[in-house]
């Protein structure tokens, strides 16, 4: 569905904010001028909505062959966030290895040290999406970084689909959680997993939202539906779940 058709539909559904994909495609940060970005922001505001976050999904920062290109794209999204007055940028940093001396983890740590400084200097935070590692491991990695700009984008479905308790993880992530997805999923006994419409999977949303309340989370609950034959209906179903818990 074209973006210009999504906005009136989102308003009709009562949605108050949208997360924009800024790493490529229609709103590629590298292709939009400052004037383009401000016009886009004005259009979103005209529907009574704000930009909750920009997504800088580049595939992670563990590969030395691609890390500089990925950092360049991510920095462009940060610059777009500056122009559009958006505080949070989201994405996956890559799979964090258990071994602190793993080559991929060392590459990631160096990249996030550099990128964290870039974010901090511009008053922005980069929220790394949870999964597939445990929240304990993500926290260990982030806490070891020298800057405070790397945070968490908490996705309970990703954790459920890896067999990780999403409620307990909130209490580990605590103040690092600046953004969250409302997404559901299921992990089957044979180890396979599947994203599901919100309320039909294994995420215990009442307990999950209660845990977020307990840590003082006051950010947006961003509905994400990556698959499915009728995602508009699934998003409406997610809104209904949010209204009832």
Image (spheres, grey):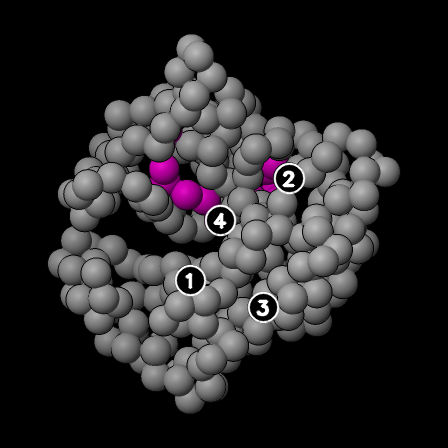
Labels 1 and 3: the sequence-earlier one: 1
Labels 4 and 2: the sequence-earlier one: 2
Question: What separation in Å lies between label 4 and label 3 (alpha carbons)?
Answer: 21 Å
Q: Please report contact status of discs 4 and 2: CB closer than 8 Å, yes or no.
A: no
Element assignment for label 2: loop
Q: Where residue 157 sits: x, y (%)?
A: 42, 32
Q: Residue furthest bottom?
A: 35
Element assignment for label 1: strand
Q: Which residue is mark 4?
A: 179
Q: Which residue is mark 2?
A: 95
Q: Which residue is mark 1?
A: 21
Q: Nearer the viewer, residue 212 or 41?
A: 41
Q: Which residue is mark 3?
A: 73
User: Mark 4 packing: few (<14 Cα in 10 Å), some, or many (20+)?
Assistant: many
Residue 6 among those drawn in magenta: no
* Residue at 46% over, 76% down: 84
Labels 4 and 3: the sequence-earlier one: 3
User: Mark 2 packing: few (<14 Cα in 10 Å), some, or many (20+)?
Assistant: some
């Amino acid at each position: 569905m074209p973006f210009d058709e999504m906005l009136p539909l989102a308003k009709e559904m009562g949605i108050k904010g949208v997360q924009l994909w800024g790493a490529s495609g229609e709103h590629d940060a590298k292709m939009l001028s400052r004037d383009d970005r401000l016009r886009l922001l004005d259009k979103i505001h005209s529907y009574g909505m704000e930009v909750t976050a920009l997504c800088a999904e580049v595939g992670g920062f563990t590969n030395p062959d691609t890390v500089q290109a990925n950092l360049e794209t991510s920095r462009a999204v940060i610059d777009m966030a500056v122009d559009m007055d958006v505080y949070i940028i989201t994405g996956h940093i890559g799979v964090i290895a258990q071994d602190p001396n793993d080559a991929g983890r060392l590459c990631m740590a160096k990249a996030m040290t550099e990128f964290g400084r870039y974010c901090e200097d511009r008053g922005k935070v980069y929220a790394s999406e949870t999964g597939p590692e445990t929240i304990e491991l993500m926290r260990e990695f982030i806490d070891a970084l020298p800057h405070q700009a790397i945070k968490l984008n908490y996705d309970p479905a990703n954790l459920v689909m890896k067999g990780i308790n999403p409620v307990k993880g909130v209490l580990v992530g605590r103040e690092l959680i600046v953004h969250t997805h409302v997404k559901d999923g299921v992990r089957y006994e044979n180890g396979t997993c599947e994203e599901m419409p919100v309320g039909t999977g294994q995420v215990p949303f009442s307990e999950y939202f209660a845990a977020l309340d307990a840590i003082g989370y006051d950010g947006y609950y961003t509905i994400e539906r990556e698959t499915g034959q009728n995602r508009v209906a699934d998003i409406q179903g997610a809104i209904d779940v949010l209204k009832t818990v």
